[in-house]
């Protein structure tokens, strides 16, 4: 998602659904075509797969079309719960990765049992949440991980709140953290950043330009923040 410099908090959406649902319903399969084969995304999945126990239970936050994340986890023999706020994305994912479980729900409202997942994926699914919501969700995801479990997160690093952007030809509002601030949020949540990878990626879409991407590879410590 390209982060612009103009701040506009008056962007209106077509209905009362969460803005991410409106945006990703409109994008549909174009999102997968634009992003599914990003090398850094594939590398992050490989890193996680190397650290999961056999038949791991995994959570895919903002599961999109199910590819590549849920598909790769299923192929490796793990179970997947994918959660996405977009019904269009959930329908696509269920058709493409029928072995996984997908729920159309807002992850901010979904109950998550403590110590219930071996791995969690959060690929670019926080950008339309406020900073307070992102921080609260990461604390909940840390608690949902089993001790020693791993979380991989990808975002567009930027010190911005409610900035209007053009994303694959659609208008949206984006909120993010700088890399250092996001690392602090993860640390407070009880997640240790083991390694990080900065890259620039241009989605395969005629309206897309180069985007800065940050991938953080994390492990849950024994006592995450409450």
Image: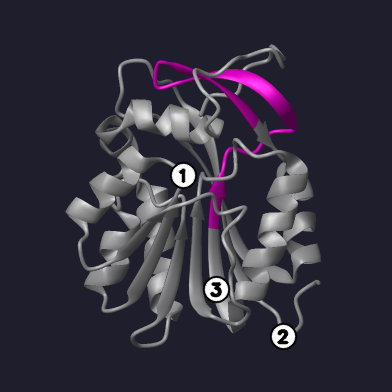
In the picture provided, is 185 more to the left or to the right than 36? right
Find numbered disc 1 in the image and state the secondary structure of the residue it sits on. Answer: loop
Find numbered disc 2 in the image and state the secondary structure of the residue it sits on. Answer: loop
Query: Pointer 2: what residue?
Result: 222
Q: Quadrant of residue 173?
A: top right
Q: Residue at x 61, y 67 (%)?
A: 218
Q: Position of residue 155 (x, y in %)?
A: 57, 44
On screen, 49 above or below 170?
A: below
Q: How many marks?
A: 3
Distance CA(mark 3)–CA(mark 1)? 23 Å
The question of residue 160 being in magenta is answered with yes
| Residue placed most toward the observer, 126 or 82 | 82
What's drawn in magenta, residue-wise?
Answer: 153-174
Q: Is residue 203 visible?
A: no
Q: Residue at x 59, y 76 (%)?
A: 113
Q: Are marks 2 and 1 in contact (CB under 8 Å)?
A: no
Q: Residue at x 30, y 16 (%)?
A: 206
Q: Give residue 150's mark.
A: 3
| Residue placed most toward the observer, 92 or 187 | 92
In the picture provided, is 197 more to the left or to the right than 130? left
Tell me the mark number nearer the camera, choosing from 3 and 1. 1
Label 3: how many Cα within 10 Å (few below 14, some 14–19, many 20+)? many
Closer to the chain start, of discs 3 and 1, is 1
In the picture provided, is 72 more to the left or to the right than 135? left
Find numbered disc 3 in the image and state the secondary structure of the residue it sits on. Answer: strand
Query: Pointer 1: what residue?
Result: 85
Label 1: how many Cα within 10 Å (few below 14, some 14–19, many 20+)? many
Closer to the chain start, of discs 2 and 3, is 3
Q: Residue at x 40, y 16 (%)?
A: 169
Q: Position of residue 216 (x, y in %)?
A: 59, 57
In the picture provided, is 207 more to the left or to the right than 99? right
Q: Are marks 3 and 1 in contact (CB under 8 Å)?
A: no
């Amino acid at each position: 998602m390209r982060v612009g410099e103009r701040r506009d908090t008056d962007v209106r959406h077509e209905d009362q659904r969460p803005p991410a649902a409106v945006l990703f319903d409109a994008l549909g399969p174009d999102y997968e075509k634009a992003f599914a084969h990003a090398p850094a995304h594939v590398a992050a999945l490989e890193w996680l797969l190397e650290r999961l126990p056999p038949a791991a239970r995994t959570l895919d936050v903002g599961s999109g079309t199910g590819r590549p994340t849920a598909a790769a986890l299923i192929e490796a023999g793990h179970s997947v719960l994918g959660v996405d706020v977009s019904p269009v994305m959930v329908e696509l994912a269920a058709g493409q990765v029928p072995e996984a479980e997908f729920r159309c729900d807002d992850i901010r409202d979904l109950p998550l049992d403590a110590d219930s997942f071996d791995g969690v994926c959060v690929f670019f699914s926080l950008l339309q949440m406020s900073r307070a919501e992102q921080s609260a969700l990461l604390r909940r995801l840390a608690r949902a991980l089993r001790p020693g479990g791993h979380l991989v997160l990808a975002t567009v690093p930027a010190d911005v709140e409610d900035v209007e952007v053009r994303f694959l030809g659609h208008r949206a509002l984006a909120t993010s953290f700088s890399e250092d601030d996001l690392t602090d949020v993860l640390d407070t949540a009880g997640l240790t950043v083991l390694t990080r990878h900065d890259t620039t990626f241009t989605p395969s879409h005629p309206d897309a330009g180069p985007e800065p991407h940050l991938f953080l590879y994390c492990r849950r410590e024994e006592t995450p923040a409450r």
